[in-house]
Amino acid sequence: MSRIANVFRQSLLAASFCLSTGLAYAETLTIYSARTEELLKPILDVYQKETGVTIRVVNNREAVLLDQLKAEGRRTTADMLITVDAGNLWLAAEAGVLRPIRSAALQKAIPANLRDPGNQWFGLGIRARTVFFNTDKLNASDVVSYEDLADPRWKGRLCLRTSKKVYNQSLVAMLIAEHGEAKTEAIVRGWVNNLATPPFSDDTRLLEAIAAGQCEVGIANTYYFGRYKAAQPNAKVDIAWPNQKADGVHINISGAGVTKHAKNPAGAQRLLEWMASEKGQSLFADVNMEYPANPAVKPAESVSAWGTYKASSLNVIQAGKLQRRATQLMDRVGYR
Ligand code: FE
C-alpha cells in the first residue's frame, strides 16, 4: 500500500472510531436533588438541549440523600448534590460526600460569602429570610429589626415557623454569629414570649395568618411571599426589610456541590459553572423567585418589585457551623 493510501486509511479508521465512540459515549450526569423537581427541570432541559449531556435526577429530602451518599460511598452514581440552605450544604461537606472544586469561573461568579471557603459548595440562588407584616395594622417602617421583634411591645403580635425547620436554625445560627450566644438567647426568648399563636409548620401558613390578622408580623423566606401574592394579589401582607441601619437582612442560599465519588466530576463542574453563568443564573433563580447569587445578573422583575435592601455580609457557612448551638438554644428557650 502506498504511503498516501495508508495515511488515508488510518484517518478513515480514526474518523470511524471517533464516530462510533461518540455515539456510544454520550456524556451522562446524575444529580441528587432536594430542590423541588419542577424548579430544577426547566434549567436542566435547557442544558441538556445545549450540550447533548443526558442528566438523570434523583429527588428526595436532603437528609435522605445525605444518608444515601454516605451509605453508597465510592459506589454512588451521584455526580452532583443540589439542595437548599447553607446549613444542609455545610452538613454534606462535613460528612465528606463533596469534593473541593478549583474553578476561576465559580470564584468570579459567586461572592465569597455565598460559597464554602473550602470550595466544596457554591450558592446559586439567594433567598432572604425577612419580616412580613399585616398591611391593615402596620407600615413597613414599624418593622425595625429581628432583635426588636423580641421587645415586649410585640407581645401577642408575632408569628413564627417551627424551630425544627433548617431555615430558622440557620437564622438563629447567623444571629449567634453576629451577637454571640447570650444576646441571641435573649432575642429568641423574647420572640417566644411574643408569639400570637403556636409556631406554624410552613412559611405559607404563616403568611396566611398575617394576612388574616391572626398576627401582625412574622419571619419567612421571600419566595413564599412571591408565590402567595401571585395567588392572592389582594392579601393584606407585605414585605419589610429589617436591620437596614445595622447588619442587613438575613440571607441564605440554594446551591450545589460536586460529589466526592463522582464518576463524571469534570462534567459536573461544567454544569455547576454553567449554572453560575449569566444564562444559568436567570434560569435557576427566576423559576423560584430567588435572587441570582451572581451579582452580575439581575433578579426577575417580579422579584425586583419587592424593593432593594442591604443584605447581611456574613458568610452563610456560619449557618452550618453554628447550627447545633442554635438548635440547643431554641430548645432551652422553649421555641417549639
Ligand atoms: Fe423553602
Image (tube, grey):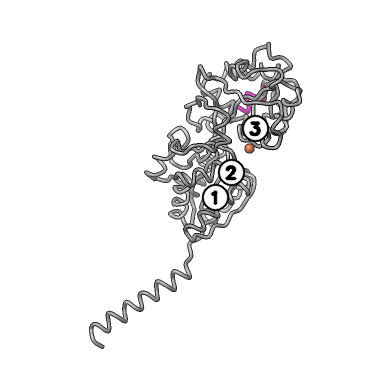
Which residue shows up at 54% across the image and 38% down it? 300
For badge 3, the amino acid type reads: Phe
Considering only order in the chain, which callout, 2 or 1, is on the residue closer to the N terminus? Answer: 1
Q: Which residue is drawn at 40% across and 40% down?
A: 107
Q: How crowded is mark 3: few (under 14 residues within 10 Å), some or many (20 or more)?
A: many
Identify the mark at residue 43; answer none if there is no mark.
Answer: 1
Question: In this orientation, which residue lies closer to the viewer: 207 or 123?
Answer: 207
Q: Is mark 1 on a helix, strand or loop?
A: helix
Residue most extreme to the top: 153
Q: Where is residue 295 in the image (x, y as percent from the top left)?
A: 45, 35
Report how far apart the C-alphas of labels 1 and 3 lie in the structure. 23 Å
Pointer 3 or 2: first along the chain: 3
For this orientation, the residue located farthest to the left is: 3
Q: In whole angstroms, how far apart are the C-alphas of marks 3 and 2?
A: 14 Å
Give the magenta part as a residue range.
325-332
Ligand 1 lies in quarter: top right
- The majority secondary structure of the magenta stretch comes to helix
